[in-house]
Image: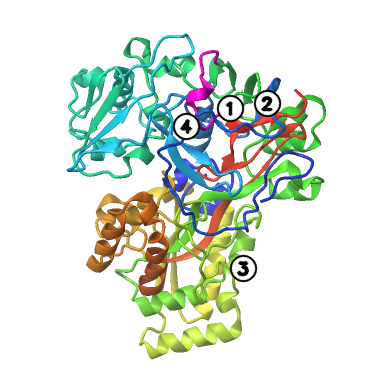
Amino acid sequence: MQWKRITAVAAGVMLAVAACGSPSSNSGNEAGGSGDLGGAQVKAIDATAKGPAKEIDGAKKGGTVTVLSDVTPDTFDPTNIYYTDGNQIGKLIYRALTQYKLDPASGKPTLVPDLAEDLGTKSADGLSWTFKLKKGIKYQDGSPVTAADFAYSIKRSFAHDLYDAGPTYQIQFFKDGDKYKGPYASGDNYAGVETPDDSTLVIHLAKKFDDLPFYAAFPMFTPIPKAKDTKKNYEQRPMTTGPYQVTSYTPGTELKLAKNPNWDPNTDPVRYQYPDGWDFKFAQDTIKAQRQVLASAGPDANALNYSNLDVSLLPEVKDQSQLVKGPGPCTQMYTMDARKIPLEVRKLIAKAHPTDSWRKVAGLNPSDSPPASTILPPAVPGFEKYELPGLTGTGKGAEDDAVAAEVKSELAKLGKSNFELSWYYSIDDKISTQVTQLRKQVYEKAGFKVRAIGVPKAKLRTFVGDQNAPVNIGKTPAGWCSDWPSGTSWFPVLFKSDAIELGNSVGQLQDKALDAEIDRVSAMTPDEQLKEWSKVDKMILEKYLPVVPLYYTGTNSPVGKNIGHAVNDMTQGLPEFTSIYLKQP
């Protein structure tokens, strides 16, 4: 998913786009530091995981958790959820075919069955997937969940004129996905789903989609009974299968949840039901809400805020255990059009980039924006830390006189003196303007010519989103986040030749050998891929260098002193809600 799907508050830092340890001895929170990137994950999936989830040491039941949120989710309709906070909140109320279980020690995610008995069975030709569903699952009203309800929710997702914010892989990969327009316009007869009986769901594909079990973790794959579908009003009283149900929802203002009496923990390997309820209050003032949480006076001790702590409040943090820290699912990059900039020049651009000063001008916080040296972020299975010379996410670049002179000399030797670098920036965004001034000054010092084109902020995405725009630096996506924790949601999408036509190309690479290597790894099993994606990552930077990695996203969110087991969910870059409890209910 692109940065536009991330509810980050540092939108100005993104320029062209708007966003997304050890247990504490006295808080019960785990704060895996963003800088601790860990090692490679050895297992991406576990088809045998069963409920109930192992009880959390010291967890207590009761009380209400309050979430003081400065951002406002756009929807709680499961078909339309795509932003990270919507996904995180959705895990409290919706169960899907699959879900991610976080390792208690490392926090790394493993895909496990949720409402399905396993992770699906693929047909010999790879064009059909069969999911056997757990029996005895009920909605909050006690009515049974059937395979037809899953089939209907999938059909519903094709009504993209009504649910225009949700994921769209089904349109590309599911059989007749380019023709079927959902149950309202095209009726119930859709060839892409089949239900031989009440506990069997078969999904038919137009082309192979081996990541389907990962995609099936989205709220879009929660069951929805056709008779209960009220279209745009469905989010007001949705049919829920998670540990909580909606008691009231005022869009833009408040969401209240209470326990779902028919949630069965014995079937759920991921979730818990410790608090009696949840009270989400939206559109809060960021500074005020975060100060309330840190102060933890009275009921605010039971509160949390899931945005990263404002830099101005760092001096006010007296107890580090009140910060949930850890890696997130995104990497921010400085992109270069490989069709327009020769490789040797791209290397000099990377060498000259004033990364340290850029971080200061952009207002980055080391706690939630750690320097990047790879394309994959630490949260994605298959990540392995490596550092190539000059690609560490740090450095003065051509601000150093010696480096500037060296780059200038190398450009001359290549016959590329005064090579023009061109990019768009926002004329009405202070950070965008300051970053452009910094880069222009440094690159001109290093012997480049700079053509920076100022455009209104409201139109910036349109300009930088054009893969064939008449510039050679900074086209989007300049930041990328995992739709699911797998390298297949990165490398095939961003670096294959067809990514240009699809509008997702990072660096506009067109190389058949790279295409073949990405296809080779993509054809492996998820566990086999873990050993290979880091090699592809390193090969792209060593051999092609279409980007300069800048930083990974991280979590640095404040929680109240009475909040227990607030851990980072690296699949979302947010505190993981379903395992939270109150120390004193």
Callout in the foreground (3, 4): 4
Front residue of 582 and 444: 582
Q: Residue at x 33, y 23 (%)?
A: 150
Query: Label 1 sits on what residue type?
Result: Tyr
Callout in the foreground (1, 2): 1
Query: Label 2 sits on what residue type?
Result: Thr
Q: Tag 3 or tag 2, which sits nearer the N-term? A: 2
287 left or right of 222?
right
Up/down of 503 relative to 343, above or below:
above
Residue 477 in percent (x, y) is at 40, 54
Crowd tier of the residue under label 3, counting other residues whose Cα lies within 10 Å: few below 14, some 14–19, many 20 or above: some
Crowd tier of the residue under label 4, counting other residues whose Cα lies within 10 Å: few below 14, some 14–19, many 20 or above: some
Visible residue check, residue 279: yes
| Residue labelled with disc 4 | 50
Query: Label 4 sits on what residue type?
Result: Lys
Q: Tag 1 or tag 4, which sits nearer the N-term? A: 4
Crowd tier of the residue under label 2, counting other residues whose Cα lies within 10 Å: few below 14, some 14–19, many 20 or above: many
Dividing the picture into quarters, in which one does residue 434 lie? bottom right
Residue 234 in percent (x, y) is at 42, 16
> Mark 1 to mark 2: distance in Å?
17 Å
Q: Main secondary structure of the magenta part?
A: loop
Badge 3 element: helix
